[in-house]
């Protein structure tokens, strides 16, 4: 699950006519931290979940700038940390999302190591959000064990380990009073619906990402309103 190094800064213009009059003087920023699931590996940029989230928010009348994305396919928690350390970021963002851990599980790393590194990343995410915990959104790790890529592997073991890693993330998210969006059950629908899987037979399709984007956009809207 390791591929070439990429840090993505995704920029797109604000669509005219999508902003309500009472929101014209207020603009928002969004930082997405993660791995291949955040960049939308193997898909056009417009199909990843941060991009789709921004489009949904704009359609609802909110003036959001381009999503800033710090992510790379194959990154573990410590590699995301290195990516953050080597990136020039704004002092503060209005909203921050964090989705990381699948490569820790894939490489057989321990849950204890994950817990410590994930909590450090989450504390940074809270800092990026100006210490507003309610403006930070953790997304759970999807289950890649249902994909064709996992053929010949122990799918039940993958499911078990994904659930264990997600329990760690959920517990730490609750400890720090941030949102935890559980997209894992939905990701398992790909076992019987190949339209939810990207052409690489491993990552989600734009259709699957649209479900994540809807949940995230709804949560962000509730915080703003």
Image (cartoon, grey):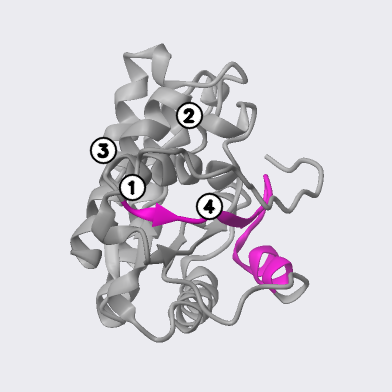
* Range covered by the magenta-colored residues: 62-84
Is the Cβ of the residue at disc 1 closer than 8 Å to that at disc 2? Answer: no
Looking at the rendered image, the disc whose residue lies closer to the viewer, 4 or 2, is 2
* Residue at 50% over, 45% down: 14
Element under disc 1: loop
Q: Earlier in the sequence, mark 4 or mark 1?
A: 1
The residue at which mark 2 appears reads as 204
User: Within the image, what quadrant is residue 175 found in?
Assistant: bottom left
Looking at the rendered image, the disc whose residue lies closer to the viewer, 3 or 4, is 3
Looking at the rendered image, the disc whose residue lies closer to the viewer, 1 or 2, is 1
The residue at which mark 4 appears reads as 105
Label 4 Cα neighbours within 10 Å, binned few <14 / some 14-19 / many ≥20: some
Decide if residue 10 is on the left or right side of residue 135: right
The correct choice, above or below, for 47 with respect to 68 in the image is above
* Residue 53 shows in this picture: yes
The residue at which mark 3 appears reads as 185
* Residue at 23% over, 49% down: 218
| Gap in angstroms between the C-alphas marked 3 and 4 | 17 Å
Is the Cβ of the residue at disc 4 closer than 8 Å to that at disc 1? Answer: no
* Residue at 58% over, 60% down: 109
């Amino acid at each position: 699950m390791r591929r070439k190094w990429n840090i993505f800064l995704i920029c797109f213009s604000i669509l005219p006519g999508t902003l309500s009059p009472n929101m014209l003087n207020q603009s928002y920023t969004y930082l997405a931290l993660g791995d291949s699931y955040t960049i939308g590996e193997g898909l056009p940029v417009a199909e990843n979940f941060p991009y789709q989230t921004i489009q949904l928010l704009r359609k609802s009348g909110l003036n959001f700038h381009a999503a800033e994305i710090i992510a790379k396919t194959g990154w573990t928690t410590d590699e995301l940390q290195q990516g953050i350390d080597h990136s020039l970021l704004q002092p503060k963002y209005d909203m921050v999302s964090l989705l990381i851990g699948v490569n820790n599980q894939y490489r057989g790393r321990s849950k204890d190591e994950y817990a410590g590194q994930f909590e450090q990343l989450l504390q940074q995410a809270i800092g990026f959000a100006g210490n507003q915990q309610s403006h930070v959104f953790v997304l759970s790790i999807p289950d890649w064990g249902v994909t064709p890529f996992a053929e010949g592997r122990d799918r039940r073991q993958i499911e078990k380990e994904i659930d264990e890693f997600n329990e760690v993330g959920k517990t730490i998210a609750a400890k720090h009073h941030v949102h935890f969006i559980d997209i894992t059950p939905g990701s398992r629908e790909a076992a019987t619906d190949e339209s939810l899987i990207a052409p690489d037979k491993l990552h989600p399709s734009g259709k699957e990402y649209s479900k994540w984007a809807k949940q995230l956009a709804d949560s962000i809207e509730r915080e703003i309103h």
